[in-house]
Amino acid sequence: MSYDHMAAQIIQNYTIEKPVVSYIRHNENLTYHVIDEASGQKYLLRIHQAAYASMTGIQHTLPALEAEMNLLHELNATTALRVQHPVRNVSGDWVTVWKSEAGKEICCTVLEWIEGRDIQQGERLTTEQIYDLGAQLQMLHQYGREQNQIDRTKVRPAYGNSHENLVMLGQLEEGVRLGIFTTEDFDLLRETFENINEQLETYPHQAGTWGIIHGDITRNNLLITEQGISMIDFCLHGYGYYLFDAGGAALMFNREERDIFLSGYTQQIAPLTDRDIRLMEGFMLIFTLGYYAFQMANKSRHEWMKDRMPKLCSKYCRPYVQNERIFYEL
């Protein structure tokens, strides 16, 4: 059975009168754009089957997807965040479990479509948009602080803690075996991870610093709408230090723009300390290296990683372990 036929069957589980389904892409999920010709309403269908094994994780399980949909529902109900509305199926469930002809069960979800446009390659956001993103991200983190949901990491992924950092390091070590990374570069990666984990041993792990995060703030997961910046694709959301999210977002900007982003992010909280900035820069490295680990099974990215890793190590990892600023200057 083709993916298109599968999508057409799955969407029948929703109260969409005349659905027209069109393919978008296949990465960590298989996604389709759905238009109800009867009402004009638009939706996003996500079939939670990753393109590569390294992209598969706890986020694809039924409990994790129910938690994601519940989060989006609660954010829409209790905050001013511009996030997608989840859609229940005809049985009233957030998640549809579809069984293939081979008997395999695949989880599927539907979200309302947000009208907006992608950020174009090379496009620079305006000062207002950068500040708005910082404010939106802080709003998400403030929701986490108020909910005090610090210990729900068994359902959703956890990011940036010592254990997960070591798991990621193990995934990156596979790159040595595959001939993508040199042993010298991997040794520097190990030293970098050890440095960050040493900081985490004494950094506060509490509701004010750790909670619900998006986990994947990149240009691909932002929309420019008439109302402002909208964060989309909470597929990888989980629990971690709020600085992990802030670091991931800060990677999109140059030094001047990071000042603007952080001013929006810290408008409701105390300014970041030197210690916060140091750890955030470590998370920026973790966030970057996470992409390499995520793509390890994608052979089409191996040459790109082989070319980039030496530069990443020499320009960022080595100065970092030498206690130098690498992304952000006070």
Image (cartoon, rainbow, N blue to C red):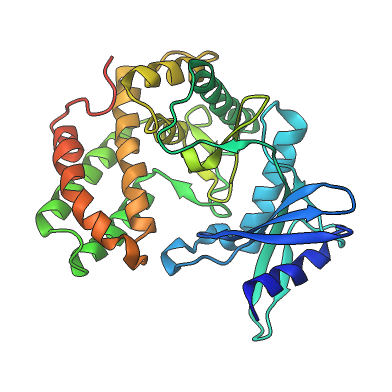
Residue at image location 49% in from the left, 20% down from the top: 126
| Left or right of 138 in this view: 65 | right
Q: Which residue is outermost to the bottom?
A: 102
Split into 4 quadrants, where in the image is the C terminus? top left
Q: Quadrant of residue 116?
A: top right
Residue at image location 15% in from the left, 47% down from the top: 188
| Left or right of 218 in this view: 175 | left
User: Residue 143 location, x and y as percent?
Assistant: 63, 30
Position above or below: 329 against 157 = above
| Left or right of 150 in this view: 38 | right
In terms of depth relative to the viewer, which is nearer, 223 or 188?
Answer: 223
Residue at image location 36% in from the left, 67% down from the top: 297
User: Residue 148 location, x and y as percent?
Assistant: 60, 33
Residue 55 can be seen, yes or no? yes
Split into 4 quadrants, where in the image is the N terminus? bottom right
Residue 217 can be seen, yes or no? no
In terms of depth relative to the viewer, which is nearer, 89 or 127?
Answer: 127
User: Residue 84 location, x and y as percent?
Assistant: 69, 41
Q: Quadrant of residue 76?
A: top right
In terms of depth relative to the viewer, which is nearer, 112 or 71?
Answer: 112
Residue at image location 76% in from the left, 48% down from the top: 42
